[in-house]
Amino acid sequence: MDDFLHFYGQKSLIRSKTGTLYDISLPRNFSGIKASIVRFRTGNLWRNGANLSFLQIPSRVITTMPFVNRIDLVFHDFGNWSNSYFHVPNHTIITNVIGFRAYDSESINRTVQFEANGADSTISVKFPKSQRNYATMRCIRFMPNGSFEFINLSRPYACETRKTGHFVIVTNSFDKGNEKRLLLWKWWVIGFLVGLGCLLFIGVLLLVLFWALKKNKIVTMEKQSDMSVGLETTWIGRSRMPSASSIRTQPSLEDEYIS
């Protein structure tokens, strides 16, 4: 695949400028893969390095096997093809696989090895940042023979390496399962709180409605009392009882007619 991309990349470098990045036009059946190419003079790369949006190469990079005057750096972003070409046991790939290889500009598909020189000098491969945070993230470098190695993750979504290759950021499959369970638990908590809030709102609404009905009943009773004949009241013991000031109908004895 790397040699195939370099073959198409050389077509993009016809009448090109040194140090300028060019997109590689690929056949339609490779849609989803993005590739680009840039040509450097070996001396300029050694003195100045290179600072691209997704790759930072320090100065004093040593080219080996063999030494050439110009090199082509081919960059790959495998996009949705990442999981088809690459696999890491017990880990889940969380970024696209990004790679870069060096070739002799004067030859077709003749690879050139180069590496950063010095203990504190490393090549930085930068990935687009994701809004999702994982408990553990590790960076992996895939080698040409298909094997892989874990390398340093200097900062979030940035791998540090000394050589070319293909790179990806992974997380433990167990951590991703925990993330799903944590997300599900959060939704359960949110649903419980929303349900509890709805129950409290309905309870308060029923209390207000009950108070309003009771108050309306009292007002109705007071209106009916105002419309009837008023009676005086008197206290009998601790109870207040209605009383009349006079008796309208005089009492009479049943045997009053007997003389």
Image (cartoon, helix red, strand yellow):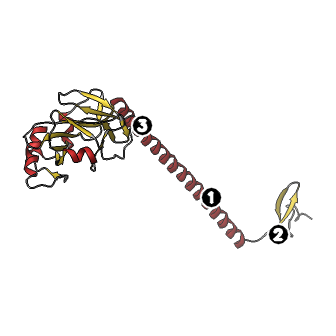
- Residue to which mark 1 is pinned: 211
> How far separated are the C-alphas under marks 3 and 2?
86 Å
First of labels 1, 2 by sequence position = 1
Q: Quadrant of the C terminus?
A: bottom right
Name above or below for residue 218 compared with residue 101. Answer: below
x 40%, y 39%: residue: 184
Q: Amino acid at mark 2?
A: Thr
Mark 3: which secondary structure?
A: helix
- Mark 1 vs mark 3: give the one in front: 3
Q: Is residue 49 visible?
A: no
Q: Position of residue 20 (x, y in %)?
A: 19, 54
> How far separated are the C-alphas under marks 1 and 3?
44 Å
- Residue to which mark 3 is pinned: 182
Find the residue positioned furthest to the right: 259
- Residue to which mark 2 is pinned: 249
In-front residue for pair 185/163: 163
Name above or below for residue 95 compared with residue 53. Answer: above
Q: Amino acid at mark 1?
A: Trp
| Left or right of residue 175: residue 203 | right
Q: Quadrant of the N terminus?
A: top left
